Amino acid sequence: MPTLPMPPTPPMPPTPASDSPGPSRRTLLAAGAASVVVPSAASGTAWGAAPPADSENSESSEDSYDTLLARAAAQLTGGDFDATDPDFAAALKALDTQASGWWRQLDRSAGRTALWADLSPASDPGNFGQSYPRLRTLATAWATPGTSLTGSAETLDTLLDALRFLHATGYHPGRPESGNWWFWEIGAPRALMDTCVLLRAHLPADDLSAYTATVAKFCPDPDRRTNAPSLAETGANRADKAVIVALRGLLARDGATVALARDGLSDVRDNGRNSLFQYVTSGDGFYADGSFVQHGSVAYTGTYGSVLLGSAGQLIALLADSPWAVTDPKTSVLYEAVDRTFAPVVFDGLMMDAVRGRAISREKARDHNDGAVTLSHVLQLASGAPDAYARRWRAMAKGWLRRNTTTPYPTLVGIPALARAKAVLDDPSVPAGDRLTGHFVFADMDRVVHRRPGWALALSLSSKRIAAYEAGNGENLHGWYTGDGMTYLYDGDDLGRFGDGFWATVDPYRLPGTTVDTRARADIGSGGGTGTYRPKNAVAGGAVLDARHGAAAMELLADGSTLRARKAWFCLDNAVVALGAGISASDGRTIETVVENRNLYADGPARRLTVDGRGQPGHDGWSARLSDARWAHLSGSGGYVFPDHDGRADGLGLRALREERVGAWRDINTGADTGGSTSPVTRRYLTLWLDHGVSPADASYAYVLLPGASAAATAAWAHAGPVRIVANDAAVQAVEARRDGLLAAHFWAPGRAGGLSSSGSCTVLVRRGHGGVSVAVADPGRAESTLDVELPFPVRGVVRADDTVAVRPGRRPVVTVRVGGSRGRTHVAELR
C-alpha cells in the first residue's frame, strides 16, 4: 500500500460570490476578496489544452500575473475587509495572538541553528517543514490590517532574513530528500510560496529566484512524486501540488508553469487517468456512490477529501478570467461531491470521525475543526457554482452555522473563511437549511450513515477492500478497533461527544458498537511512514430502501485473534437494532461487545442511568452486573433495549461502569507536526457492554439503540416490542418492524427468515404498504453474480424496477437481481 502522510490542515482561503457559472467575478463583501468560478465548457480554451504559446507569456499575461498574485494574497488575508467590524474582532485577535507569540519566540541571533527552539535544528525536514508555516502566519499578520505586526518594517526585515536562513540551512536544491517526503514536496513549498506571495513587493529578485528554484526541484509538477517518479499523484496530494505549482509560476512570471498547474487538475499528462474531475472505480478519489478514498484503501472524506475540494476550488478561483482559466467541463464532479460526498457526513457543522482516518488523534484538528474547514470550502465553491447548487449549499451551510453553538464557527476559522460565512448569515434571502435526513450506504468506502431529524448514526466498517485503520508517523497509536463496526451516535443537543477530549481519554478497547478480544495491544504507527491494516473479510456494507431505512452487515475477522463474529445493524425511523451471531474465539480471553461508551465530560449535569425503572448509582467507580436487564436509559442520551430473542439470556449479560479516565493527546499522537500535548485530560464515562465470557462458541447478542428517547418511551418500547427479531444466527440475521410493514435481513448464506428467502449472501429490505411493495437488494460481499429473492406475500406486477432487476409475480413472487459487478450498490424495485 502507498504510505502517504496526511497534510496538516491548510489555511482556508476566502472567496466571494459569483452571479453565474461562467468566469465572471463580483466581490463577496466590500472587502473584495477573490471569487471561486467554475467556468463552463464553452468558455475560454478547451479543457486541459494549454492556450497558444504566445498567450502564456504575452504582454496581456504580464497584467494577469499581477492580478492573480493580488488575488492569491487576498485568499490568504481576506482582502480589504473592515478591520473595525466587530464580527472580525475574534478572528483578528486569534491571528494576532498566534503571530505575536511566534514573533516573540523567534531567534534572531547571529549564531542560531533554528528560528524557534522547539524546531531545532532547522536542517531537519520536520523542523523546516514546520518553520515555514509559522513564517506564513507572521507574513499574514504583517499583511492583514488590524494586527500588532501590520506593516511593520522590523517584521518585514526579520521575515526576509528568516527566509534566507531556512534556505541556506535546510531547504534548498542542493539537498536530497530525507525523512517524510511530504515536508519537502507539499508542506514546506506551499507555505514558502504563500509567504512569497504576501511579501512579493519586497522580496529581492535573487531571493525570489532561489526560492522558486527550490520549489521547482521538489515540486516540479502536480503529476509525480519527486522522490518516486513512477508514483502518480492522486486526490488531495495532486490538488495541493497544483496550487503550489501555480503560485510558483505566477511568482516566476512563467505562463507555461501556470498552465502545467491547471492541466494537473485534469491530468493532461496521463490523458485524464488521475484527473480530479472524474469518478474513480478504484484507488484514490471520488466515487459515484459518494465515497472518497485516499491512500488506496482509507475512507478519508473528512480530511483528504476536504483538502481536495478546497485546493481544487481555490485554484479554479485563482485562475478565473485569466489566460489559464480552468475550463474542464467535468468540474461538475466537485458540485456533485458536495451533496453526495460531504453533506451526509457533516452533522451540524461537525465532520464525522468515521471519515477522518488517523486525524482523529490530532489534538488541534477535531471533528469541529475539520467540519469548519469543509464548510468553508463548500461556501468557496458555492461562490462560482450555478445558482441551483449555490442556493442549496448556502442554505445548508447557514443551518450548520446556526445549529452549532457548542463550538461556534467564528471561533474556529480565520478572517477569509469568516468573511464568506458572514455574507451568508447576513443575507436574509438565504434560509437556514434543516438537517439532512436519509440513509446513505457508501459501499466503496465501507461506511454507512443513517440520519434522522434529531440524530445521526455512522458505522465504520472494514473489509479486504477498505482498511480498518491507518496509522503512522506517530499518529493514531490506539486506532486498533475504529474500523471494526464502531458506532457513532450524533445528537443535535450534544455536539461535544466526540470532539471534547474523547479520543485522548476513551478506553480504546471499548469503542461503541465493536466486538473485541480483550488482549493487550501495543501501539501502532509509532515509526516513520504510514501503514494500513485491511482484514480478510469480504462482507462490509448494506442496502438502503426508499432513502429512509437501511440494513448493514460486517463479518469480523479480528486482527491477531481467533475471534470471529457476524454483525448486523438495522436502521429504522427511531431505532437501530444491532445483532451479533457466530461469536467464537479460542484464545482463552474474554470477548466483549460494547453497547455504549458515553463521554460525560469533565463536569456538567449528572447523567442518570435507569435500568428496568430503577435508578443506578451516579458516582465514579460504580460498576454492576445487570444480566437480567431488559432496558436501560441514560438521561441526555437515550434508551437501550436488550430483547431476549429466543427465550434465553445469551452469554454473561450486561455490564455497566462509571469511571473517570485520565489521558493525554500525546498518548495517541507523537507526530512531528501533529503530536499532542502531555497535559492530562480528564473525562467521565458511562460504559455498557455485553460480556460473552472466555473463548465463547457461537455466542450472540441483540440490543436496540433509541437515540433521544425518554425513559418512559424506552420502557414502553421494551414492553411493546414494535420490532421483532426474526433470526439471529450465523446463517441469517433479520428483523421485522410491523408498524412500518418492513422486513429486513442479511443472509450470510442461502436461507429463509420470516417467509423471505435468498439464494445467496445478500442484504434485503422489503416494505409492504397501501401504496404497494418496495424491495431493495445489495451484495455487500461482492461474491454473487445473480440472486433470487422470494417474497412472503403475493405480487401482481411491477411498477418500476432497476434494469438489473427482474420479477416473477405470483403468490410466491421471486425477484431476480443481477448483482455481479455492481460494487455492493443497492438494486430496487417497486411492485404492486
Image (spheres, rainbow, N blue to C red):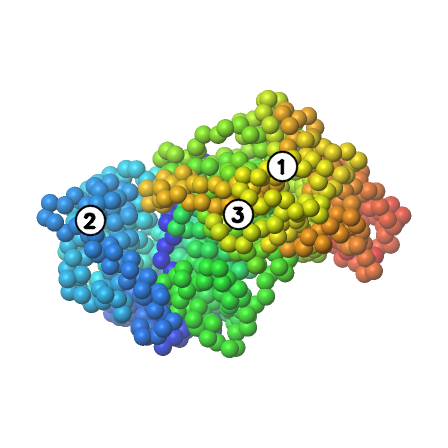
Q: Is residue 138 above or below residue 216?
A: below
**Amino acid under disc 3:** Asn
Label at residue 599? 3
Element at label 1: strand
Q: Which residue is mark 2?
A: 115
Q: Quadrant of residue 556?
A: top right
* Dot placed on the residue nearer the N-terminal end, 3 or 1: 3
x, y percent for residue 634: 62, 49
Element at label 3: strand
Label at residue 314? none
What residue occupies the far left of the structure in this picture? 110
x, y percent for residue 714: 71, 51
Residue found 65% across the figure and 35% down from its top:
625
Q: Is residue 562 above or below residue 297?
A: above
**Pointer 3: residues within 10 angstroms few (<14), some, or many (20+)?**
many
Q: Is residue 119 above or below residue 528?
A: below
* Dot placed on the residue nearer the N-terminal end, 2 or 3: 2
